[in-house]
């Protein structure tokens, strides 16, 4: 009887593992620096963000989000109120951008000159 119960448990676990194999692995790679440079310039110009600019990232986004990578962009100009933009990347391409929100974690990142 114990053997039969153990065998059934093993078969049930094997069935569950095939479901997990069908799920995406989340192996989306971070965007390349050359691609990001073009996108950052485009977004900075569109947002009329005064230069010089600073960037942070790429940051891995929360696993439940649609876009797996975030890059943060802000102006380093002295008269700016630090408007920060979050750029969202998927499969190495810019999907969208917006003002950074708390969930983007841009405010706790180390920025460097761009």
Image (cartoon, rainbow, N blue to C red):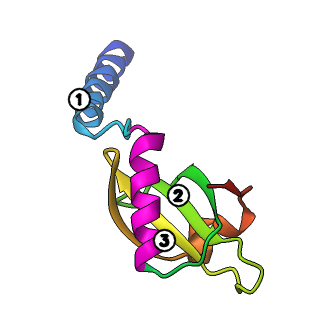
Please report the residue visible at 57 percent of the width from the left and 66 percent of the height from the top. 73
First-in-chain label (2 vs 1):
1
First-in-chain label (3 vs 1):
1
First-in-chain label (3 vs 2):
3
Disc 2 crowd, CA 10 A, few/some/many (<14, 14-19, 20+):
many
Secondary element at image label 2 = strand
Secondary element at image label 3 = helix
The residue under label 2 is 71
113 over 105 or under it: above or below: above
User: Residue 68, can we see it?
Assistant: no
User: How far is disc 2 from disc 1 in space, using C-alphas?
Assistant: 35 Å
Q: Main secondary structure of the magenta part?
A: helix
Quarter of the figure that contains the N terminus: top left
Could you tell me residue 42's position as x and y percent? 39, 66
User: Residue 106, can we see it?
Assistant: yes
The residue under label 3 is 44
Q: Is residue 43 magenta?
A: yes
Question: In the image, is 3 to the left or to the right of 78?
Answer: left
Please report the residue visible at 65 percent of the width from the left and 67 percent of the height from the top. 52
**Identity of the residue furthest to the top in this view:** 3
For the residue pair 17 and 103, the one nearer the viewer reads as 103
Q: Which residues are magenta?
A: 29-46
Q: Which quadrant of the structure image shows residue 41? A: bottom left
The residue under label 1 is 18
Evaluate if marks 2 and 1 touch, with contact meaning CB atoms under 8 Å apart: no
Could you tell me residue 47's position as x and y percent? 46, 80
Question: In the image, is 50 to the left or to the right of 10?
Answer: right
User: How far is disc 3 from disc 2 in space, using C-alphas?
Assistant: 12 Å
Question: In the image, is 51 to the left or to the right of 17?
Answer: right
């Amino acid at each position: 009887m114990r053997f039969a119960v153990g065998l059934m448990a093993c078969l049930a676990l094997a069935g569950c593992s095939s479901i997990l194999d069908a799920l995406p692995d989340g192996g989306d790679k971070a965007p390349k620096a050359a691609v990001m440079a073009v996108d950052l310039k485009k977004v900075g110009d569109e947002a009329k963000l005064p230069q010089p600019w600073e960037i942070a990232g790429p940051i891995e986004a929360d696993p439940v989000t649609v876009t797996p990578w975030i890059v943060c962009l802000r102006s380093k100009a002295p008269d700016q109120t630090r408007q920060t933009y979050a750029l969202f990347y998927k499969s190495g391409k810019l999907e969208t951008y917006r003002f950074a929100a708390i969930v983007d974690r841009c405010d706790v990142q180390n920025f460097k000159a761009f």
